[in-house]
Amino acid sequence: LMEIRKEELNLFPTPISLYDLSHLDMDIISNVIEDTPKDKFKLIDNGKTDFNTNSFILNHPDLFDLKDSIEECLYDYSMRLGTANIVIYNSWSSITEIGGRLELHRHEGFVVSGVFYPKVDVPISPLVVRSPILQNQMFEIYSSKIDAQYKQHHNNIFPHSGMLVLFPSWLEHKTDVEIGRRTIISFNGTYDWIANSLLS
């Protein structure tokens, strides 16, 4: 048979960036998370968060270095996207106990969202991201004999100490039943000119 020339285009990717901030003091960051008052929240089972208190945890004086590092990563991420500069708009911390879970959700009204894992002493459940094109895949019947990236409807991101994950705010994500104790700092980012007008 004649060889047929082929070119493949993987268009419209979902940009997720993983940064290693393990050079920071994870004990100090963890202590701030533990000491910040928290309440129950509708998206978290068997866990608590300070999301509703408007604490803006990254403004804590002991987290200056963390906030500065996250802002550097946001700048790098905005360069990757080719967008105007993105800055932190709000931030909060959460603790999920063993057996808890985080419901599937997205962060509407923002451009970039992120989660930081300060101290992962034992394995915890992965961050699960859902394919944004799943609703368009109406009639694909996948073969168990073929390993292809297009079969993935969900992907797992396994946390480690000092890991920062940045992703588009429209990307749906969750955690399944927690196998460890998860302590995190989450935040949303938007364009600097929007943040300046809303926070001024």
Image (cartoon, grey):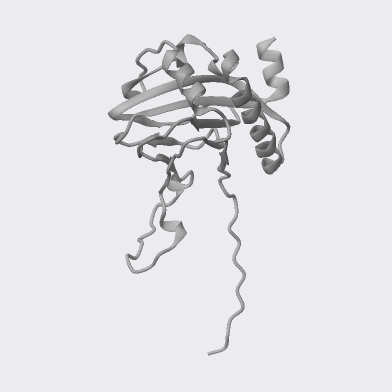
Relative placement, left or right, of 61 versus 99 is right
Horizontally, residue 178 falls left or right of residue 192, namely left
Residue 146 percent location from the top left of the image: 38, 67
Residue at the spot 71% in from the left edge and 14% down from the top edge: 197
Residue furthest to the left in view is 99
Residue in view at x 60 percent, y 74 percent: 6
- Quarter of the figure with residue 109: top right
Quarter holding the C terminus is top right
Q: Is residue 19 above or below residue 24?
A: below
| Figure check: 40 above or below 157 | above
Tell how many labels.
Answer: 0
Q: Nearer the viewer, residue 45 or 183?
A: 183
Is 156 located above or below residue 101 in the figure? below
Observer-nearest residue: 78 or 163? 163
Residue at x-position 73% and y-position 21%: 193
Q: In the rendered image, which quarter is residue 131 located in? A: top left
Residue 25: quarter of image: top right
Location of residue 2 in the rendering, given as x and y in whole percent from the top left corner: 57, 88
Q: Is residue 117 left or right of residue 189?
A: left
Residue furthest bottom in the image = 1
Q: Is residue 54 above or below residue 133?
A: above
Q: Give the x, y percent position of residue 44.
A: 35, 24
Residue at (40% x, 52% y) in the render: 138
